[in-house]
Amino acid sequence: MTEMQSLEQLKEHQDELEKSLDNYKAPFSFGIGLATKGSSGAILDVLFPAPQLGSDPYSCAVLAHATKWDGTTTTYELDKDTLQTIERSLTVALTNIDYEEETIRSVNSYPMLSTT
């Protein structure tokens, strides 16, 4: 990914991410959560610090691309590499551009969601 320095570059990157997925359409809602699992591996609960409802278009495109989202309602368990890719993309937008979304803030505000 080229280092973004403007809102225009961010929008271009968002468009590229959206076009890379078949039949992409922004979802009604989405969120990044941190799950607690029991000893059997079953999910006991999930913390969603910033669930989104029809908002955060750049974050949504980044997450959809990283998970190869197919438009269906589902849960993804992300590995560290995928989380780092997501975090890098969102952090670049926050650091280099006067642009902010709640999802971007939550990834940077909650150490448990950070991979660093």
Image: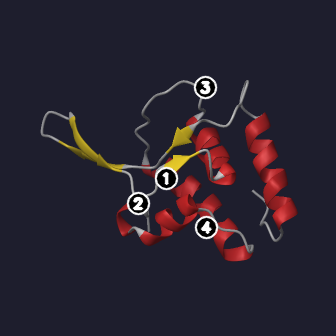
Question: Camera-side residue: 21 or 80?
Answer: 21
Q: Which residue is mark 2?
A: 113
C-alpha separation, residue under disc 3 versus residue under disc 1: 19 Å
Q: Image check: 42 left or right of 111?
A: left
Label 3 or label 1, whichever lies nearer to me, is: 3
Disc 4 element:
helix
Name the residue that disc number 1 marks.
Answer: 83
- Sequence-earlier tag: 3 or 1: 3
Asked if the residue under mark 4 is in contact with the one under mark 3, i.e. CB atoms within 8 Å, the reply is no
Query: Mark 4 or mark 1, which is nearer the start of the sequence?
Result: 1
User: As drawn, is 107 to the left or to the right of 110?
Assistant: right
Give the class, few, some or many, for how many residues have Cα within 10 Å of label 4's Cα (few <14, many ≥20): some
What distance separates the C-alpha of mark 3 from that of mark 2? 24 Å
Residue under numbered circle 4: 91
Q: Earlier in the sequence, mark 3 or mark 4?
A: 3
Q: Amino acid at mark 3?
A: Asp
First reached walking from the N terminus: tag 3 or tag 2: 3
> How far from the left and from the top, in percent, is residue 99?
71, 69
Q: Residues within 10 Å of mark 1 (few under 14, many from 20)?
A: some
Residue 115 quadrant: bottom left
- What is the C-alpha distance between the residues marked 1 and 4? 12 Å
Q: Mark 3 sits on what residue?
A: 70
Amino acid residing under circle 1: Leu
Which SS class for mark 1? helix
Residue 17 in the image, given as x and y percentages of width and height: 74, 43
